[in-house]
Each structure stands twice: as structure tokens, then as C-alpha cells.
Amino acid sequence: GQNIDQPTEMTATEGAIVQINCTYQTSGFNGLFWYQQHAGEAPTFLSYNVLDGLEEKGRFSSFLSRSKGYSYLLLKELQMKDSASYLCAVKDSNYQLIWGAGTKLIIKP
Amino acid sequence: DVKVTQSSRYLVKRTGEKVFLECVQDMDHENMFWYRQDPGLGLRLIYFSYDVKMKEKGDIPEGYSVSREKKERFSLILESASTNQTSMYLCASSGGTGDGPDTQYFGPGTRLTVL
């Protein structure tokens, strides 16, 4: 079967750094997405990785290792507005997105 | 910016009613999707469409149907609503060039309650 694993919930402090992990087992791999979803709102696109390595976008970075079936989202200089759920999704061999259940990130002052 | 709109943010219906959820996108995207999102579960694909009048079943199509008569509009239909269809319904579209052709952009969602 296809499976995406993420921690259910994480807590971090304002100004700190947090790493949200995602491991996947899918039928094929054609890229990995990270989305942010604030409570009661739609998911919004953060990043896309298709090759191994680190992609940096401001305070957010995303890393991919295809051989390990692993990705992480790194958030630096955390702000209260970063409190949200972070969704990992893998594009499989049929180019369909398989979604993880999401990680709820709680930022404390 | 891509804009995906959905007809209602909140909807309350009774068991057995026929329910229509409308989704419109303004970026001329080829692909449109309907998902449902439930606590503790990932987004689950109900139906998707790669072209006008074309539809494909996703992972959980039972109890649902769709219609795509125009490129910008994708409708989800619950033929006879049941309480286990109480959920958040999210529409998405993809096919642009900005963040890649497979990046999906979501509407605000419709929270449907079936009593």
C-alpha cells in the first residue's frame, strides 16, 4: 500500500527552529510537496522537491532524500503566525498526490 | 494569483437530500479535483477531471458524482446525503506554469454537515 508518515503534533518556541519530518512508501515517486494549512482554511503551497537536496525559500527550507524515502520541512525564526498544520504529499507513478495526515505545529511565546 | 472559489463555506443538509457543491477556478487550469478532509486523515481524493466532460474516480467515489461542463467549473454532487458524508470538502485545480504544472491550488473549502 501507499503510506505517508508525519508526526501528529509538534510544539516549538517563537524565534526557534523546527524540523517536520515526512517519510513515504509509494508506488513510484515523481515529486514531493509541502503545504501549509491554517485552521479552517485551505492548504497553501509551500515547496516542491523532485531531486535530492535542500530547497530554500526565505525562512522555510525543504529537504529530500529519495533513496531513504524521506523529506523534512525546516522552519527558522518561528513566528506565531506559523502555527498551522503542515501537509506532506507525494506524487506517485500515476502522477496522483498521496497525502499525509498533516503535522499540527503549535508555537508558544 | 490563482483563485479557486467554492459556492458555500458552510452547509447543513438532511439525510437523503441531494447536495451540490460548486467550484470555479479563474486560471484556465486543465485539472480539477475534489477532496474530503477528516480529522486525523490525509486529504482523500473523491474525483478528478483532466478536461471538460471528462472525469475519473479517485480513492473514495462511492456516494458521489461530478460534472464538468465548462473548463472553469467542477461540481460535486452527493446523490443522497448520509451522515458519514459530514466533512470538509476541498476543491483544487492545477495545470499552470508558476509553481509547476502539478502544484494544486485549493479553494477555501465547504464544511458540510448532514443531519
Image (cartoon, rainbow, N blue to C red):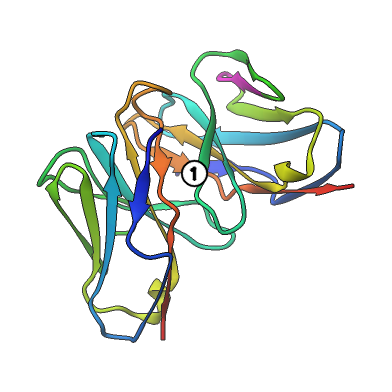
Q: Is residue B27 left or right of residue A42?
A: left
**Residues shaded magenta:** A61-67
Q: Label 1, secondary structure: give it.
A: strand
Quadrant location of residue A36? top right
The amino acid beneath tag 1 is Trp
Quadrant location of the N terminus of chain A in the rendered image: top left
Task: Check disc 1: other Cα within 10 Å, few if <14, some if 14-19, many if 20+.
Answer: many
Subunit ID for the residue under disc 1: A
Q: Which residue is mark 1?
A: A99
Residue closest to the eye, A63 or B24: B24
In the image, is B23 to the left or to the right of A50?
left
For the stretch drawn in magenta, the main secondary structure is: strand
**In-front residue for pair B108/B15:** B108
Q: Residue at x 57, y 13 (%)?
A: A52
Residue B63 vertical placement versus B23 (above, below): below
Q: Residue drawn at (73%, 51%), measured in percent from left and top?
A: A9
User: What is the total number of numbered labels drawn onto the structure image?
Assistant: 1
Can you give x and y, in whole percent of width and height, for residue B84 in the image? 41, 76
Image coordinates for residue A107, horizontal then vertical, percent:
81, 47
Magenta-drawn stretch contains A47: no
Please tell me whether residue A64 belongs to the stretch shown in magenta. Answer: yes
Q: Nearer the viewer, residue B39 or A70?
A: B39
Q: Is residue A85 above or below residue A35?
A: below
Percent x, y of residue B27: 29, 34
Q: On the rendered structure, is A97 left or right of A24?
A: left
Q: Residue at x 30, y 78 (%)?
A: B81
**Residue A81 location, x and y as percent?**
72, 44
Q: Which residue: 69% across, 34% down?
A: A21
